[in-house]
Amino acid sequence: MKIFKNKLELKDFLSKQKKEGKSIGFVPTMGALHEGHLSLVRKAKEKNDISVVSIFVNPTQFDNEEDLLKYPKTFDNDVKLLESVNCDVLFFPSVEEIYKDNIVSNNFNFDGLEHQMEGKFRDGHFDGVGTIVKALFEIVEPNIAYFGKKDFQQLQIIKKLVKKYKIPVKIKGCVIYREDDGLAMSSRNARLTKEHRKTAPFVYKTLKKAKKKFGIKNANELTEWVKKQFKKQVLLELEYFTIADEKTLETATVIESNKKYRAFIAVFAGEIRLIDNIRLK
Ligand code: PAF
């Protein structure tokens, strides 16, 4: 695996590959890789000639200084994992390489997608995501980029970004990878205490139960039911549960048969924030 820290050197290498007619599959990450990330790399390899992964803990998408400082950094292990799936290229820039001395995000208008759910609770988060993803796309110029559906709102926002800025890349949303007990894989899971790790699968269990009740209970009743379940769980604190239109991400009050819906949830397990979602019928 080739490792680049310098964006111009990476650009130069990739442009030579493109001139030879090779396609590029890209997986942007913040490191602390897990099986979910590796599944994206496998997909990138399957469909493209060259797989590129970036590891960059992007400071502008954190609304909480402590979360940024404590974000797990496991570079040596990440390299081993990437080599185990034969990743071709790793881009591992410094903050200066990306932002120079001006660590700020651009302001984006994602047609309202950015104001829903995570946008309400994480100030400026999607401006930060938009800034880094756009910058990475400009450096890597991939044919296809792969994102997990755990961050479903992020996925929709990146699709919007690409459309608005006419960036010639196909965005592929990929299934959520889960631990055996149902907990959605996330780099932040490594920071859960033993007790919180044991309780965390309750999030997905509740989502699955809510999915079964969808259609029997209306959106409001279901939301109230979920809130009640979390009141009984002292170790988990529900931040939001919402049923939203997959396209607009707006909270649904009335369910229309021609639309697709998802249930979205954010929960605190101690100081670790977990998010998850499930497709509803
Ligand atoms: O999902 C992530 O890991 C990050 O938000 C991303 C897309 C790599 C941008 O920093």
Image (cartoon, helix red, strand yellow):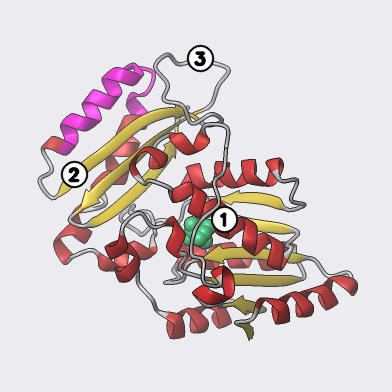
Amino acid type, callout 3 = Glu
Which quadrant would residue 45 be assigned to in this image? bottom right
Tag nearer the camera, 1 or 3? 1
* Label 1: which secondary element: helix
**Image check: 191 left or right of 161?**
left
What residue did someone put label 1 on? 131
What residue did someone put label 3 on? 256
**Whether residue 223 is situated above or below residue 278 in the rendered picture:** above
Residue 43 seen by the camera: no
Instruction: State the CA–CA distance, disc 1 to disc 3.
Output: 34 Å
Tag nearer the camera, 3 or 2? 2
Where residue 232 appears, x then y in whole percent? Answer: 10, 38
**Whether residue 8 is situated above or below residue 222 in the rendered picture:** below
Prevailing SS of the magenta stretch: helix
**Image check: 139 left or right of 210?**
right
Residue at figure coordinates x 63%, y 56% from the top left: 134
What residue did someone put label 2 on? 237
**Image check: 2 left or right of 70?**
right
Amino acid type, callout 1 = Thr
The region drawn magenta spans 212-230
Where residue 141 appears, x then y in whole percent? Answer: 74, 63
